Image: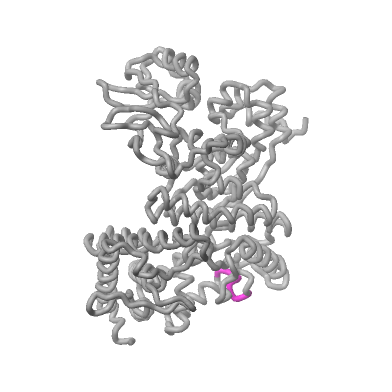
Amino acid sequence: MEVEDEKTQLFFKETLPLDHLNDSQLSEVVKISQTAYRKRDHIMSLKSDFIYLIRKGAVQISGENQTLKELIGEHDWFGYKPECSLYEHRTVEDTLYYRIPKETFFNLCGEIDIIQQFFNDRRPSSITSSAASDSSEIHLLGNSVMQMSRAIDPYIVNDDEPIRSVAKLMNDKNVTAVMITTDGKLSGIVTDRAFCTKVVADQIDSSMPISRIMTKNPLTIEYFKSGVEAMLIMARQQVRHLPIVKKEKVVGIITAADLLRKQSHNVVFLISEIQRAENIKKLQQISKQIPLLLLRDVDANMDEHDIAYSVSSVGRAINQRLVKLAEDKFGEPPVSYAWVVAGSLARNEQILHSDQDNLMILSDEYNPKKHQKYFKSIAKFVNDGLNECGYIYCPGDVMAVNDRWRQPVKVWKDYFKEWIESPEPKALMLASIFFDIRCIYGDSSLFYSLRDVILEKTKKNSRFQAFMANNALMAKPPIGFFRNFILDASGERKKALNLKKRGVTPVIDYARTYALANGISSVNTVDRINALVEMKGLSKKTGADMIDAFKFINTVRIKHQAKQLKNKQEPDNYVDPQEIHSLDKKHLKDAFNVVEDGQSTMGVHFNATILS
């Protein structure tokens, strides 16, 4: 055995649950393991075909709006939970890790009890095979958690029950979780994993009460909620089991396995398939399912924010996979870089396929003579691939393949310095795209160093703020003096309400202007407004009204597009007022008035009117 293999086997022997394998089994795992290395601040692109183990270093797992989910280090596993595809995995130290093929690993060790318990028997083929074999597929979006749960008669024990007896119960009944009650009320939950991470790892006496290892005050879900709501809770809170309650009484339990086993078109499954795609043709096929994802989300009465986040997650995953495929084709980058998306995808507000907006931030070590060919090849591969997947080429050529938008950090800093310190209205209309940006792959430190400089400058420059506000006032809500709708032409169609340009865009521009003026790093519109309220940049009432207006306008827009999809029409943003229910018309007018009032206040606040 090679010296490095001996070191790897010794490391595995000290890692839970591999420490339960014999030398022969460990040797087989060593043979299939691949060693990889990433520098600090690299945003990783995980493949669903692999599980990952950190040998040295640390990885930060973040959810929506960079909320920290977990910080993991040496001997920690990641990438084995289906919901991990919704999260960003970023190295916070130089990190050495192992990539282990899931299928081969579970074929070798999957029948060993401790392995099953630790990884909850998540084999890569189970999602696809079960979905394909279930001819009466139960949809996440149209059914309640009670309908989808396989455990509507949950096992419940008192908090003083010995750990040993609970383990025996779970083993005899073949269940992965038991609910714990104190004085008849739900007080905790114990999953099979607790016996690995707490009982075995910490050598807790099995005669101790089960309350010693239970997760206290577990998250729950009401019995009438949909499967997709359960999925979103699990994804955001990183849990795999949710007790189902009815009038505060536990009536069942829903697991991640229940959800994934019954649905092949949810966002987690689609992202999993994207991560496994080996070519652009496969990505094209997956991308074609986005309209179906939108339809099901709408039919389930999902919140517009969750719908947009769901669709954006798929778009983000396609970008990441294309960049990784490009690296596989052209080799490792000669210097570090960041792949950055802009616009609606950066804001997590994408509804369907849209034109692509992206850029590359290169290390200042970049040498055009040596490196230009490589990075242009990467950019062209990704931009062409996105176009083939339905994300058409940007009409304004805001794409990384354009040499202007593929530059070192120092050049990007010069760009923003000019836009901020010498603002011109026409230039700012283009530049505003670049004030909604998000790094989704590569060396994120390049991105953050640029972002910090941008926010420091925008916060101090009142002239820039006035120009941004003035640009934001150009798109007025479509409401007249007598509360009548103002209709816009739509090609050959009759006039209609443009709910993108004159509906959601004014709120997006409003939130961006205030956020940049206050140095807020969030890019999602609702997140920006909430951050402004928290720092008292807006009143609670103003913030709540603007968010309600934005969400209602966007909901009408999304429902309109869903209706067009059902009628086999090309989705657009032009809504005929005749299609809108009379009560919704009233609410829509109220929403437009809220936005109009917000714009008026913004104009005065930033002295934008003097530029008109």
Please indicate whether residue 483 sits to the left or right of residue 44 in the image. Answer: left
* Residue at the image point whose x is 53% and y is 50% from the top: 90
- Asked if the stretch drawn in magenta spans residue 535, the answer is no
Q: Quadrant of residue 29?
A: top right
In percent of width and height, residue 319 lies at: 59, 58
Whether residue 248 is visible, yes or no, is: yes
Quadrant containing the N terminus in the rendered view: top right
Of residue 213 and residue 275, the one placed in the foreground of this image is 275
Q: Which residues are magenta?
A: 403-409
Q: Quadrant of residue 110?
A: top right
Residue in view at x 34 percent, y 60 percent: 551
Q: Residue 168 in the image: x percent, y percent?
A: 46, 14
Query: Is any atom of residue 509 visible in this view?
Result: no
Q: Position of residue 159 (x, y in %)?
A: 32, 19
Location of the C terminus by quadrant is: bottom left
Vertical side of 466 occupied by 283: above or below:
above
Taking the spot 34% from the left edge, 23% from the top edge, the residue there is: 180
Between 582 and 11, the one lying in front of the other is 582
Is residue 472 left or right of 54 when viewed as pictured? left
User: Image height check: is 269 above or below 519?
Assistant: above
Asked if residue 406 lies in the magenta stretch, the reply is yes
Q: Look at the image and name its color scheme.
A: one colour
Task: Note whether 545 is above or below 25 in the view shown.
Answer: below
Residue closest to the eye, 467 or 86: 86
Total marks in image: 0
**Residue 134 on image: x %, y %:** 57, 35
Q: Quadrant of residue 254?
A: top left
User: Would residue 456 appear left or right of 261 to someone viewing this image?
Assistant: left
